[in-house]
């Protein structure tokens, strides 16, 4: 999968932008506030139909302009396609086009240009709370496995209903009569989540470890370990056994759930632990190690996507080079050779000997 060309009119701080890209590395170079991230945002918008820094479309239109237009020439699944988006100031809804044909919703553009985005916030994913790591798994799995997406939606719905029940049962004890049914269904869908997460994480761990080893010149071994409900010793067990174990956990937490009014049992608390050379990254990882491991995770996610779909997603790396030493920076800029990569960076010393460097100044490309 490849982005060959991008043209922007009145998008963010770009009045007009028109540029061909390299099929390999594209280094977007410029000082702060010149429009580097805006460029990645435009690519992302065409890929996903939404921006990653705002939900308000109006913010994407250049101040004072009546509309914004984005157009990309993309090569995917063996053919050239054009993605185009038009957004308007005011109430008129945006319009999306695929190779000249107007589409009614963003789902119709799904898969034309797949991107894996990495922002500075993602760098700290291994230091943050479990919810962030669950989101990493869920986001990838929802795209790759429709069955998982359905199970997750169902699980979340059941969880919200059970949470309401646990909160209000003192006022209306009759409500508790439906609790066993909720528990049963949550154990069934929860088992699907655990089954899928365990397998995905096993693959992610293997691939991320290989990237991390290359990053650190073989000095560091990255391991990921899935953490789920305590009664489950083997998350690779058959679904029926996972379900039974989840029910056992629910039973042992029944009283505590009633007393606390909270849902304490189930895979909504899942997490994974990362270690480097057997030390927890969360507790002991240095800045550079933590960032390297996070980038390795994203590269692994991209590999899995490529293996599953036969198409390598375009990698968008926003500002990931700071705090990495020269060797690790070099790895990002020069060694990620598979597929197409866009890397934003402020430091002219990082200019790569591969691919293309695009210099951005005040919403203009200088090349
Ligand atoms: P940094 O290195 O600090 O991350 P950057 O090159 O990534 O900088 P961007 O985040 O792309 O910078 O933003 C560049 C500028 O775009 C900002 O100064 C912002 O004020 C401006 N900008 C954002 N939205 C709009 C808009 N709708 N119209 C005009 N300018 C905008
Ligand atoms: Mg930026």
Image (tube, rainbow, N blue to C red):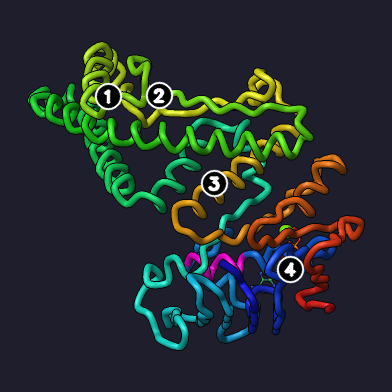
Identify the mark nearer the N-term, 3 or 2: 2
Question: Is the C-beta of the residue carrying label 4 under 8 Å from the nearest atom of ligand 1?
Answer: yes
Q: Identify residue for label 1.
A: 242
Residue 64 in magenta stretch: no
Q: Residue at x 45, y 23 (%)?
A: 227
Q: Position of residue 63 (x, y in %)?
A: 65, 78
Identify the mark nearer the N-term, 4 or 2: 4
**Pointer 4 and pointer 2: residues touching (CB < 8 Å)?**
no
* Rendered image quadrant of residue 33: bottom right
Judge depth for marks 1 and 4 and give the one in front: 1
Q: How many numbered markers are drawn?
A: 4
Q: Quadrant of ligand 1?
A: bottom right
Identify the mark nearer the N-term, 3 or 1: 1
Residue 41 badge: none
Q: Residue at x 82, y 72 (%)?
A: 361
Q: Identify residue for label 2.
A: 228
CA distance separating discs 4 and 2: 42 Å
Q: Nearer the viewer, residue 182 or 241?
A: 241
CA distance separating discs 3 and 4: 27 Å
Mark 3 neighbour density, 10 Å: few (under 14) some (14–19) many (20 or more) = many
Q: What secondary structure is marked by label 2?
A: loop
CA distance separating discs 2 and 1: 11 Å
Q: Position of residue 305 (x, y in %)?
A: 49, 52
Identify the mark nearer the N-term, 2 or 1: 2
Q: Identify residue for label 3.
A: 301
Magenta part of the chain: 41-48
Q: Is residue 231 left or right of residue 330?
A: left
Mark 1 neighbour density, 10 Å: few (under 14) some (14–19) many (20 or more) = many
**Pointer 2 and pointer 1: residues touching (CB < 8 Å)?**
no
């Amino acid at each position: 999968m490849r982005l060959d060309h991008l043209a922007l009119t009145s998008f963010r701080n770009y009045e007009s932008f028109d540029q061909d890209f390299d099929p390999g590395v594209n280094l977007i170079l410029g000082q702060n506030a010149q429009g580097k991230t805006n460029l990645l945002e435009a690519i992302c918008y065409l890929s996903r139909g939404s921006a990653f820094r705002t939900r308000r479309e109006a913010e994407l239109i250049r101040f004072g302009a009546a509309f914004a237009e984005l157009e990309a020439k993309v090569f995917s699944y063996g053919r050239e396609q054009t993605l185009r988006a038009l957004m308007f100031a005011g109430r008129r809804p945006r319009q999306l086009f695929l190779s000249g044909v107007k589409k009614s919703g963003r789902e119709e553009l799904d898969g034309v240009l797949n991107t894996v985005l990495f922002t500075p916030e993602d760098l700290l994913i291994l230091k943050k709370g479990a919810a962030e790591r669950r989101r990493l798994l869920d986001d990838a799995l929802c795209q790759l496995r429709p069955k998982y997406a359905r199970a997750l939606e169902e699980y979340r719905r059941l969880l919200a209903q059970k949470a309401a029940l646990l909160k209000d049962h003192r006022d209306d004890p009759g409500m508790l009569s439906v609790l066993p049914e909720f528990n049963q269904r949550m154990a069934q869908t929860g088992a699907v989540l655990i089954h899928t997460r365990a397998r995905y994480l096993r693959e992610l761990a293997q691939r991320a470890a290989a990237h991390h080893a290359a990053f650190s010149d073989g000095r560091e071994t990255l391991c990921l370990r899935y953490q789920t409900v305590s009664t489950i010793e083997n998350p690779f067990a058959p679904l029926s056994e996972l379900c039974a174990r989840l029910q056992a956990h629910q039973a042992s937490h029944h009283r505590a759930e009633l007393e606390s009014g909270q849902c304490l049992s189930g895979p909504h608390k899942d997490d994974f632990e990362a270690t480097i050379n057997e030390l927890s990254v969360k507790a002991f990882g240095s800045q550079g190690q933590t960032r390297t491991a996070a980038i390795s995770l994203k590269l692994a996610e991209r590999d899995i996507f490529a293996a599953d779909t036969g198409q390598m997603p375009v990698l968008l790396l926003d500002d990931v080079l700071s705090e990495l030493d020269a060797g690790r920076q070099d790895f990002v800029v020069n060694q990620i050779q598979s597929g197409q990569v866009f890397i934003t960076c402020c430091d002219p010393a990082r200019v790569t000997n591969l691919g293309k460097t695009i210099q951005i100044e005040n919403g203009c490309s200088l090349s």
